[in-house]
Amino acid sequence: MRNLRTGPWPRWILCLSVFVSSMAAAQSRPEDMVHLRSIDPSIEQDIRYASAHNFTGHPLDGYAAAQCLLTQEAAQALARVQKALRAQGYGLKVFDCYRPSRAVADMGRFATEPGDPRKAEFYPRVDKQDFWRLGYVARVSNHSRGSTVDLTLTGPQALPAETWTPAAAQVDCTAPYGQRWRDGALDMGTGYDCFDERAHSDTPLINADARKNRQLLSRAMEQEGFTGYDKEWWHFTYSGTGPRKDVMDFPITPLQASNLLDASHQLIVVTSKNWTDIQGTAQRYVRRGSTFEKYADPFPVVLGKNGLAWGKGIAANVEQGEGPVKREGDGKAPAGIFKLGTAFGYDSTANTQLPYLALTPTSECVDDSHSKHYNELVDGATTPRDWNSSERMRRDDDTYRQGIFIEHNSPASPALGSCIFFHIWRGPSSPTLGCTAMDQADISRLFGWLDPRQSPLLIQMPETQYQHLRTRWNLPER
């Protein structure tokens, strides 16, 4: 949570509070600051300072929404961490990201005022007047520069997350794993924002499992350019091309439909005549400043045998409008805005910048929603089998000779649809079971064109819905 070590500063914090309040209305979100959900919706979020479940006992100033915002570079790096961890069966949950300066000032006010509403949980052995001296709170936080994140590690051995209410009992954040607040994470030795020596990264006071989990998280973060902080195991700052020098104070607001494309520089837009049409047209776009321009010529595609239906994707939490909803086995391709994942094919290598999986005779995509591998590409020969149905990927035809995973239901929710791809069609009038298919020459062009550094997205829906949402979602003109 904290960044720069300082001494007490009650008079200073009063000055900062006046300065921040005068700036609040004037500052707006810089273009390079993006919602993490628009980069990787699979990363879980529990933004503590937007609620009263934090060491102050109240939502902090500037947190108008429980959303993680980061610089685009830091968010993309965090998405790479998530991908690497998911391949090992783990994942990330973030507690705090960008923090407005006014929220830092709010923390300072709290430390100078009487009352300790959450002391028993977050700092039972520390006087709040000592937060700065001990290195747990900062006058100026790197969180306010947009490249610092507080987070934890999730995995199959984690206890289920509890739903916090103000009536919840306060349990010491250093209590044994099964007794303290259950945040849905693995045992990390302490809870989040625990102002205690046990929260120090290299403490000998935690058990072997917690130490192992901290090391796993730290290694994954360090491999993508994040540096930890020795007083807080959850705190990491992304270096990248260097953090910005200025701190920011724009408020954290909900992810708006108009912000869905903020991080993307490559789009593929697919539209059909109506919800039940099996054919559509695809057009590529590239970003030019704040707008998108068409790239190359449009090309035909085929959709699900029963047309389209709203899927999850990154637009799941914003208004979509009327229309059918995607379900497992419904024969519909998903409508919405989607990230593009792994490319795959029959060849051992491919001319693509996307991550590539060479399919083998034992490659499967699991469509059994009761499996923990639901909606995943797995090697059926090496993965413990807990599914009753799947799709064989190395086929006798050319359908999957080249394909790209469409992240419609990631992380997977039961029965909402699985194994959705771009792939090669059988012909321009032959629909799919829920994928989007095209001529081999067109998918080969996508292989060579798509660049994961450009955060490419698929936008797919009927023409009427596209026109209805175009202004609200800031979609390019067809």
Image (tube, grey):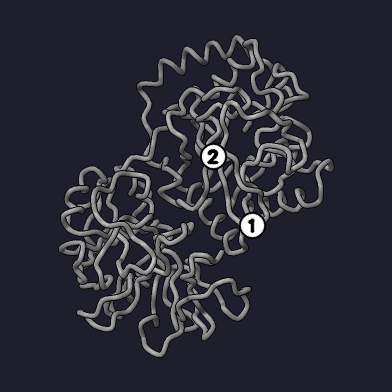
Q: Which mark is residue 293?
A: none
Q: Looking at the picture, which amino acid does disc 1 mark?
A: Pro
Task: Name the amino acid type tagged 2.
Answer: Asp
Q: Is 386 positioned to the left or the right of 459 in the image?
A: right
The residue where tag 1 is placed is: 156
x then y, percent, for residue 159: 66, 48
Classify residue 420 as left or right of residue 348: left
Q: Position of residue 239 (x, y in %)?
A: 57, 45
Q: Residue at x 54, y 19 (%)?
A: 106
Q: Please tell me whether residue 471 is drawn above or below residue 172 in the rendered image.
A: below
Which quadrant of the figure has residue 305?
Answer: bottom left
Q: Is residue 30 left or right of residue 240?
A: left
User: Above or below — where is 152 with respect to 284?
Assistant: above
Residue at position x 50%, y 79% from top?
358
Q: Residue at x 52, y 43 (%)?
A: 45
Q: Which residue is mark 2?
A: 46
User: Quadrant location of residue 415?
Assistant: bottom left
The residue at 65%/10% (across/down) is 114
The x, y position of residue 336, in whole percent, is 31, 55
Q: CA distance from mark 1 to mark 2?
A: 18 Å
Task: Please rate how many residues cluster around mark 1, counting C-alpha atoms within 10 Å: few if below 14, some from 14 to 19, many from 20.
Answer: few
